[in-house]
Amino acid sequence: MNEKIEGFFDVCTIKGPKSTQGVIIPRSNAHNLMLRKDIIHAVEKGKFHIYAIDHVSEAIELFTGTVAGKPDARGKFKPDTVLHRAHQQLENLRPKDRKKN
């Protein structure tokens, strides 16, 4: 994992660093990181980010800035969530004769 983060950091540096760049890693792997000092300094200065997450829904929220959403007891998502919009898009792709009423 260290090599992948370092490689991505190097590409970001070559392409022109932006303060929005970073990586997402499983929280369970965070304690194994042994990164170069230049990456550690960039993270400390807010010029590169390492987001440790427990579930993919956290990544969805990081990418979109919107609540991912969790299904209720009927399997429905609240309308203002990413997963509700994704579900709606999938429903729109379903042939009309197969749509649920």
Image (spheres, grey):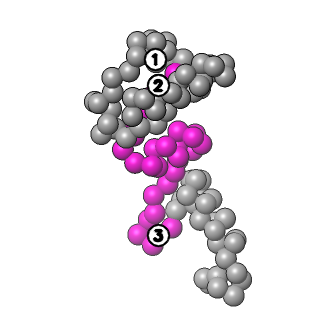
Q: Residue furthest bottom?
A: 97
Q: Are the residues tagged 2 and 1 within 8 Å (C-beta)?
A: yes
Q: Are marks 3 and 1 in contact (CB under 8 Å)?
A: no
Indicate the amino acid at tag 3.
Answer: Gly
Residue hosting label 2 = 6
Q: Secondary structure at mark 2?
A: helix
Q: Quick check: is 58 in the magenta stretch? A: yes
* Residue ID at (33%, 32%): 30
Q: Which numbered disc flags the more N-terminal residue, 3 or 1?
A: 1
Q: Amino acid at mark 2?
A: Glu
Q: Which residues are magenta?
A: 48-76
Gap between marks 3 and 2 measured at Cα:
40 Å
Q: Secondary structure at mark 3?
A: loop
Residue 44: % across, % down:
44, 14
Q: Quadrant of the N terminus?
A: top left
Given contact means CB atoms under 8 Å apart, are the residues at marks 3 and 2 in contact? no
Q: According to the image, label 1 marks what residue?
A: 39
Task: Kindly identify which residue carries mark 3.
Answer: 75
Q: Give above or below for 61 relative to 85.
A: above
